[in-house]
Amino acid sequence: MATRKLTKRGTKRRDQVMDVALRLFADQGYHGTTVGDVCDTLGVGKGVFYWYFESKEALFTELLQECLHKLRRAQQHEIERVTQPVARIEQGIRASIDFFRETPAFLSLIRGAARYEEFATLVTHGQQIVVADVAVHVKEGQAQGTIRHGDPDLMAHGILGTVFHFVEIYFGTDIEETADRPQLADEAVAFCLHGVLTGSAL
């Protein structure tokens, strides 16, 4: 379906549909949420929904892509003025944890998407992009002698896996549940960097 050119009011309404759907998907899961649920929560007819989205799957896909885009943008924002590769890796870890702490509904969305065959490839693609980003910093650190020799992609996968495991275990689906464990970022940074730094850089 071609993207409609929306008025300011139309854009606001579309954003409202996405916000409501995000909350419902986070609370009820993809299969547990219907187009009717979204419309009833928003107080509109289904015609409004289908004006903006051709299906529930299309809406979920767009929300997931937006989530992955915002995560990468948050990471890049934190590292754009950092010159040292090890410091960039650290700031990227902290930015990722802060992102999921502040937007737990997105974490729930990724959790759900990874379980569904029709969306798992999108999650995998997003992870591959982040891994490639981290591998660039690993390679630069290796060239400088601050990161030990090894496969940069494997190291990047290890860092990403650690971060996602930490947030998967300790973060819930709402902001209240993510408020505890303020030391989580410190522990993730310490664990990841201990695994990649040279002995002299520890």
Image (spheres, grey):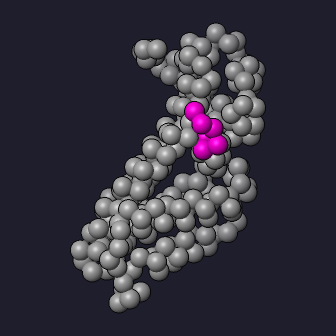
Residue at horizontal 59 percent and vertical 13 percent from the top = 50
Q: Is residue 149 above or below residue 128?
A: below
**Residue 66 seen from this side:** no
Q: Position of residue 153 (x, y in %)?
A: 38, 62
Residue 15 sits above or below residue 185 on the image: above
In this view of the protein, can residue 55 be seen by the observer? yes
Lateral position of residue 173 relative to residue 16, left or right = right
At 35% from the left and 73% from the top, the residue drawn is 150
Where on the picture, by quarter, is residue 56?
A: top right
Residue for point 35% across, 90% down: 200
Q: Is residue 62 above or below residue 99?
A: above
In x, y percent, where is residue 78?
Answer: 40, 59
Query: Which residues are drawn in magenta?
Result: 113-118
In the image, is residue 106 part of the stretch drawn in magenta?
A: no
Comparing 46 with 55, the one in front is 55
In this rendering, the count of numbered labels is 0
Farthest residue to the top: give it: 47
